[in-house]
Image (cartoon, rainbow, N blue to C red):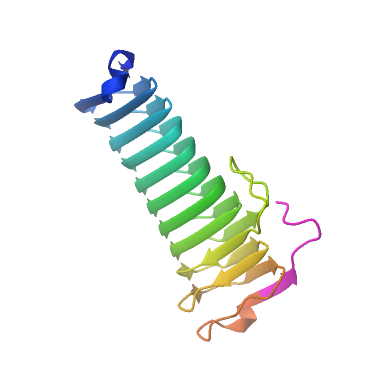
Amino acid sequence: MIKHSLLASIMTGAVAISAHAQDSSFDGLAGHVEENVNGNMEMNGASVSFTGRVTGDLIMNGAAVSAEATVLGNVDLNGGSVSFEGNVAGSSTINSGALTLQGQFAGPVEIQAGAATLDGDFAEALSINAGKVELDGRYAGPIRIYTEANSGFLHRRDRSRVTLKGDYARGGEVCSYEVRLDDNIRIGGPLVIMATERPDVPSGVNPDLITFTDQPEGGCQD
């Protein structure tokens, strides 16, 4: 295993670069690692970022977490602010206050967040518990989105909202105070919406695919 210990150079912005490495890890206050890892990559710190390719799993924990990566294994990201752009062959598990997720995801994706913005190609099931959700892209598997006033690291007291754009081949289930459907949305399977008001259904969507019910008393509970 290659271990990056950069505490001595934290104040100048720690950077570790190598062309290839076996299992690799970083532990420090702040650091950026750029490398191709033939194994697992783990980073722990206040502010951590990674750029590269990982043949195993990518695990990152910090107040601010960011990555631009191709990951052949699974992804596990935990932080107050999380940004990921890239490709993931395995499953993705993310816990964040504010999340931005872009790329291609071949496995299931599970998210706990205060606010989540997603755009990309998602091949399997997507599950989100959050306060505010905005989706765009292509979703081949079913989606399951539940929003709560107090969700993730950010304790929201305002009204939760889900905005759906893109293509949803198998539909799914959405529960939120407010649900918005983009005019150009494409829905290929049954979609259950639980909200305080029925959303406007665009003319290009088969209304028979939409089932609306009132948001459960007490809000959405997954």
Residue 49: x %, y % from top left:
34, 34
Q: Magenta segment, which residues?
A: 211-222
In this rendering, does residue 105 appear at all?
no
Nearest to the observer: residue 160 or residue 111: 160
Horizontal placement of 5 versus 193: left or right?
A: left
Seen at 66% across and 69% down, the residue is 192
Nearest to the observer: residue 46 or residue 75: 46
Say above or below: 72 vs 184: above
User: Magenta residues: mostly which secondary structure?
Assistant: loop
Figure label count: 0
Say above or below: 180 vs 105: below
Say above or below: 199 vs 73: below
Looking at the image, the residue that sits furthest to the bottom is 203
| Quadrant the N terminus occupies | top left
- Any magenta on residue 86? no
Say above or below: 161 vs 209: above
